[in-house]
Image (spheres, coloured by chain):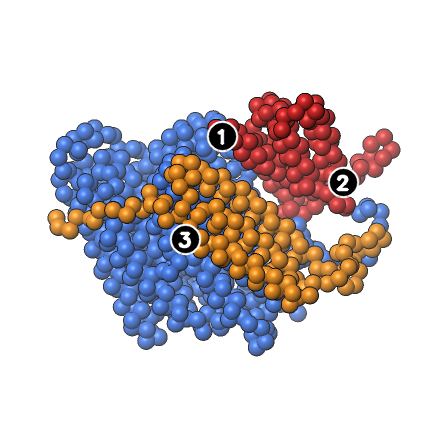
Amino acid sequence: MEPLFAILVGALFTVAFYLFLSKHVIRILMGAAILGNAVNLLIFTAGRVTREVPPVIGSGSDVLAAGAANPLPQALILTAIVISFSFFAFLLVLGFRAFQKLETDRSDEMRLAEPVSDPSPPLGY
Amino acid sequence: MASQSAPLVDLSAVYVTGPVAAADWLVAAPVVWCILVGAVLVMLRKNTRVQPLIAIPALGVLVLMTLALVWHVIANGTVTMTMGRWLPPFGISFTVDLLGAFFAATASCVALAAGIYGRTDVDDSGRRYGFYPFLVLIMAGILGAFMTGDIFNLYVWFEVLLISSFGLLVLGSERAQLDGGVKYAFLNLIATTLFLVATGYLYGLFGTLNMADIAVKASELRGTAPLMTLVTLYLLAFAMKAAAFPVNFWLPASYHTPRLVVSALFAGLLTKVGIYALLRILGMLFPFEREALSLVIAIVAALTMILGVVGALAQNDIRRALGFLVISGIGVMMAGLALGSPAGLAGAIFYAAHSMVVMTALYFAVGIGARLGGGFELTRAGGLYARSGLIAALTLVLFLSVAGLPPFSGLWPKIMLVKASLDVGAWWLAGAILVTGLLTTITVGRIWVLAYWRPAPGEAGEAAAATPLPVGATVALAGLVALSVAAGVWPEPVMALAQDAARGLLDPSAYVQSVFPAEASQ
Amino acid sequence: MRTLIFRSIAPFLTSLMVLFSIFVLLRGHNEPGGGFIGGLIAASALAIYGIACGVAAVRRAIHFHPMAISAVGLFMAALAGVLSVFAGVPYMTGLWIYPSLFGVELALSSVLVFDVGVYLVVVGAISSIALGLEEGDRD
């Protein structure tokens, strides 16, 4: 299973980075969303993929059954999903507000903070 | 349920069973305090008059807590508290050594100054947007990052401070802020995602996320696991957070857009969290890989400091020039990391603390100058010395300090770093540090001559001449300047602290023993 | 979206979902559920109500500002950990008491307080984003 997952993670990273290279903020945003999922899958694979034994402690027992799936990557992924979800929501709102106020979603036209024709500092006193 | 069944396993294999000393609570207290106060401030978000009255005393308490923590760590060595009593490495440990405590105390002082300065700089609308809640919550993120002993937890604190910093950055949603905010948000998101990628690989290799556990296991895995790849990935992620040269462009694009006090806080603290993470992970956990990468780090460091200050020279907007000076300072700290010797790391630690205080104070000084009528543009600024000699003098102190001239706090860490570079024969690194000092002197000297010494051009000066000096802001500025001067005139205690902290990084046995007391005693 | 059928059903659907979210929250310690997922269910309930009857109606119904709800949750969650200072155990250690109510043993814990805090944080944060986006559509 792991090689398959590794290829999938690689493919998702490729898509994400391709989208990052775009000039449009909305595509970069989608790239960020895909990148988040790629990383989650990566953590999941890094925690070793096992089959069919859920990491749940049955009643009358205080320890996990042998060969159970590793619950820690799932906890890490849950945290990462929550964080990347809230980031995505924030970036969506930010990108939308920027589009409304700056009237462009092309990142190379967003030069308000760094104007192209910024004057040089005085060269003499 | 838990009450009826008898436990089948030995509880001492699961729980921390030792008693918790009251002083150990100092480890958790600063972060918990910030979260509690932040929550209260969010509830009071409409009540703009009460907010600073709660936030500033609360930040004062925070300073006291972190100072007590420094004192506790000096007296008793590294302290650990493991959350929820789960035995490490399964539970998340907060482990504070001298480095974490020192940075936490410095950062708290800076935050207190920012809280006081915010009273004059942030108007009612900014407060309604949540300046004070975000300020306190970003401190929770920063202090959590300095104190945690778990890599994934470090990632979570990075995100806490990042989310709060987004809130602070777009406070008011002006057009330039949105423009800067988009670049800041996306590039920092990519940096933290890289951090998460590296952490995923690290977990796959080590099966643990506890830093002390990793420090122990790294030497066993060194022969078999691709640790170099892992460490290079961490270097890239944290260099991006710290704004080192090839990946620094988000900083000058965004740091001049928010309100001044926010710029000051970011310049002082955020990049230093990246430096802290570099010191902790490359310096402490993977010293051999850091050694192998040291030439790369040194080249990056030299390029960062030189290109940073050259960027500063080319700027007309004083705030942007300061943003480039922040980058230049990051290069100096990375030079210490590249050297990796006790003296080099100590120099980097001292310089980071100096930079936290001085960079924040510089933005404060420039903000007060603009308020007095100077504005931020060098072509139009002037006459500030005539308007307020006090502010001009304080600013000059800061300018000399950031350039590394005696007798202020910038001098000593640079001396330590230059000496450490010459010790290993890296004359070019020492040369880069000295050339950076010279170019910084030129940059800040020009700003001082143009904005402070030169008479105010035309009628622009007279209109603003009546503006009174903002008292709270001046107090905050003077407090930070006093810290810088004190560290410059009596550098021995700070130097000793930085050297002890560097020794703690290079020999993590005390850190490991604090987390795993039982194993070490066997 | 605002058909008569949807508008008539939405209040019932919302109250059922909020009830279910509280059920999920309370069973969460030893069974699937908990504060986070419960909070998501409650937030989606509020979002449905908002789509059917408008954002103003939702704001009236929850009375407090969503961010204030979040803040109360954050405060509760952080405070739940602080309780362990009185028991002499590290921060965030779960503390349990078993009071008997009408002959039924109740298992109450600081973990539950934490979970309720998480529930409130999630309800507040998600519904504040959802309501903000729904309002943003109209201008």
Residue with the mark numbered 3:
B271
Q: Residue at x 41, y 29 (%)?
A: B125
Residue type at mark 2 is: Arg
Q: Residue at x 63, y 47 (%)?
A: C91
Residue type at mark 1 is: Arg
The chain that appears blue in the image is: B
Q: What is the crowding at mark 1: few (fewer than 14 residues within 10 Å), some, or many (at least 20)?
A: many
Pointers 3 and 2 in contact (CB under 8 A)? no
The percent coordinates of residue B123 (x first, y second) are: 37, 30
Distance between the alpha carbons at the discs numbered 3 and 2: 43 Å
Report the chain holding disc 1.
B
Mark earlier in primary sequence (3, 1): 1
Q: Quadrant of the N terminus of chain A?
A: bottom right
Asked which secondary structure carries label 1, the reply is loop
The percent coordinates of residue C42 (x first, y second) are: 67, 34
In front: A123, or B1? A123
Distance between the alpha carbons at the discs numbered 3 and 1: 28 Å
Say left or right for B305 vs C11. Answer: left
Residue with the mark numbered 2:
C27
The chain that appears red in the image is: C
Asked which secondary structure carries label 3, the reply is helix
Asked which secondary structure carries label 2, the reply is helix
Residue with the mark numbered 1:
B45
The percent coordinates of residue C80 (x first, y second) are: 64, 40
Q: Residue at x 45, y 62 (%)?
A: B236
The chain that appears orange in the image is: A
Q: What is the crowding at mark 3: few (fewer than 14 residues within 10 Å), some, or many (at least 20)?
A: many
Report the chain holding disc 3.
B
- Residue B309 position by quadrant: bottom left
- Residue B57 position by quadrant: top left
Say left or right for B424 vs A14. Answer: left
